[in-house]
Amino acid sequence: MNQIARDEFLHRRRAGIGGSDIAAILGLSKYKTAYDVWLDKRGEAPAEDESDKPWLYWGSVLEDVVAKEYGQRTGSKVQRVNAQLIHPERDFAVANIDRAVVNPDIAGRVWWKDGRLTTDRILECKTANGFAANLWGEPGSDQVPESYLCQCQWYLGITGARYADVAVLIGGSDYRTYTIEAMPDLFSDMMSEAEAFWKLVQDGVAPDPQTLADAQARWPQHVAGKTAVASIPTVRAIEELDAIKQQAKALAEREEALKLQIMAEAQDAEILTDMGTPIATLKTQSATRIDAKALRADYPGIADLYSKTSSSRVLRIKSRKE
């Protein structure tokens, strides 16, 4: 996909809720939150440099390979549907499917007709890191990662298809196929959540933060002198956090003492053993870092050129005795 086509795709995607958004809205995505999606739909998300995300590039490149393999293994004919598919009753619900599987009982191609696809099966093509193989169940089952399950149910509900096959290439050599059947009741629940979320987008009201990063991004600066009254649950949260921090401090001190004991016994030995079996190593490691203080003193112009300022709010617990 060239840059112009990608920019157009991203522009159209912001006009509605797609398959890559719904899991985040439901709180089931490991990669983004509802607030991330809200910022994107509002056009307020920070620009991302995708050049350092090779998995996106290879996922796009290998989509054709995976689709072709699916066709060869199943004997099915697949085709692209070069259109954004829009739910006939909820125009914010959109789908950009990878492929449609041609219905053998209907000659020719698959069409988007009267708000439905003229086939009962679609295909999603995925690639996955070999370390993620345990997230996928037995081939032929519907045991796929939750975000992909949400995506498929979203597409099935919008297109009217009954089945979504997920073809995945794991670790570059492990090809598998899974089949997900449409669950209308689940799609109805998803649609209700999506409709409520879309209203927040239209009204400019941010969803509640789901992560600490969400909260830090939503309220990056404090208002000098402003106070807020803590609710009883928040007072309890502060007390619990204070207790956890005290426990963490004690654990850190104990960790330091244990490391000292081990290093004092090992002295300059590389390996500690117990009855001939290695149980710990103490190897010298080297690291190179830039001496920022010296660089700024000797070459302030260069230091300024490669410096950037960032800020974040720091939470500190106030003792009741202060």
Image (cartoon, rainbow, N blue to C red):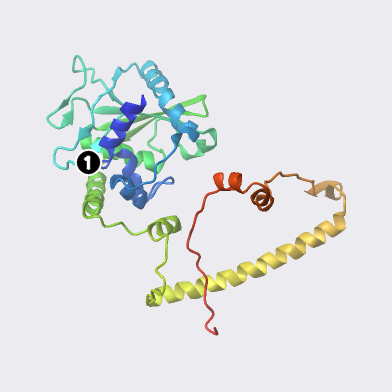
Residue at left offset 79%, top offset 46%? 284
Give the side of residue 60 with respect to residue 93, left or right: right
Give the side of residue 116 with respect to residue 226, left or right: left
Q: Residue furthest left?
A: 114
For the N terminus, which image quadrant? top left
Residue at left offset 21%, top offset 32%? 85
Give the side of residue 90 with respect to residue 254, left or right: left
Picture quadrant where residue 217 is located: bottom left
Residue at left offset 47%, top offset 40%? 135
Res 182 visible: no
- SS assignment at label 1: loop
Residue at left offset 23%, top offset 53%? 196
Closest to the observer: 288 or 120?
A: 288
Which residue is disc 1 drawn over?
A: 93
Residue 288 in percent (x, y) is at: 71, 44
Res 310 visible: yes
For the C terminus, which image quadrant? bottom right
Residue 126 in percent (x, y) is at: 41, 30
Closest to the observer: 269 or 300?
A: 300
Task: Reply above or below: 162 against 230.
Answer: above
Disc 1 residue crowd, few under 14, some 14–19, many 20+, Cα 10 Å: many
Task: Reply above or below: 265 against 154.
Answer: below
User: What is the total number of numbered labels drawn onto the structure image?
Assistant: 1
Residue 200 in percent (x, y) is at: 24, 54
Amino acid type at circle 1 is Ala
